Amino acid sequence: MGNWYDNQKQSISNIRQLLQERIEKANPRRKLTTEETKRLAKLEAIAGKLERREHVQNRKLQTWLSEEEYEQLEYEWQEQLELRSELKDKPSDLKRYEEKLRQANFNYNRAEGYSSKGKHSTAKKF
């Protein structure tokens, strides 16, 4: 049975390889120049830093992004700042709900603490 499974895995692997070869023939990709390769590597490094939530200097972004890309980045950042400032101003009903929820969680946890210590009558008060 192990032999059959190995053959199946190998045939699937061969099919995937054939599909990949056909895709490459149908969509030939041009080779990147050394400058494009260098830019791609730098942009991938910057993207990696951003995904790890590390700081990336604006100077580095300006160096490796085109003017249009950098302007788009600035525009999207301004949109984010505006969105964040709008979200800071919560409606009063939502603020009141969050306060009531916080108080309910506090009382529940307090009651759980009393109950775990064997003080059931005090726990019922909460």
Image (cartoon, grey):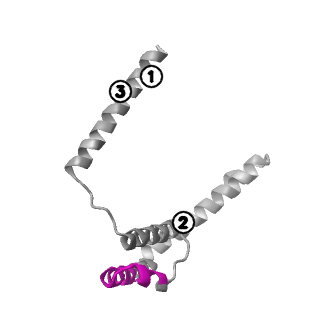
Q: Is the residue marked by circle 1 packed among few (<14), some (14-19), or many (20+) residues within 10 Å?
A: few
Q: Is the residue marked by circle 3 packed among few (<14), some (14-19), or many (20+) residues within 10 Å?
A: few
Q: CA distance from mark 2 to mark 1?
A: 39 Å
Tell me if residue 71 is in the magenta stretch. yes
Q: Which residue is the site of mark 1? A: 6
On the image, which quarter does residue 85 sit in?
Answer: bottom left
Mark 3 or 1 closer to N-term?
A: 1
Circle 2: element type: loop
Q: What mark, if any, has residue 11 been given in the picture? A: 3
Give the camera-side residue of 57 and 99: 57
Which of label 3 and label 2 is nearer to you? 3
Mark 3 or 2 closer to N-term?
A: 3
Mark 2 or 1 closer to N-term?
A: 1
Coordinates of residue 26 in the picture (x, y in percent):
20, 49
Circle 1: element type: helix
| Residues marked 2 and 1 touching at CB (< 8 Å) | no
Q: Which residue is the site of mark 2? A: 52
Q: Is the residue marked by circle 2 packed among few (<14), some (14-19), or many (20+) residues within 10 Å?
A: few
On screen, residue 15 versus residue 119, left or right, reads left
Q: Amino acid at mark 3?
A: Ser
Coordinates of residue 116 in the picture (x, y in percent):
75, 47
Q: Amino acid at mark 1?
A: Asp
Circle 3: element type: helix
Coordinates of residue 30 in the picture (x, y in percent):
27, 61
Give the camera-side residue of 61 and 113: 61
What residue sits 28% from the left and 43% below the top? 21
Q: Which residues fall within the magenta stretch?
A: 60-83
On the image, which quarter does residue 13 sit in?
Answer: top left
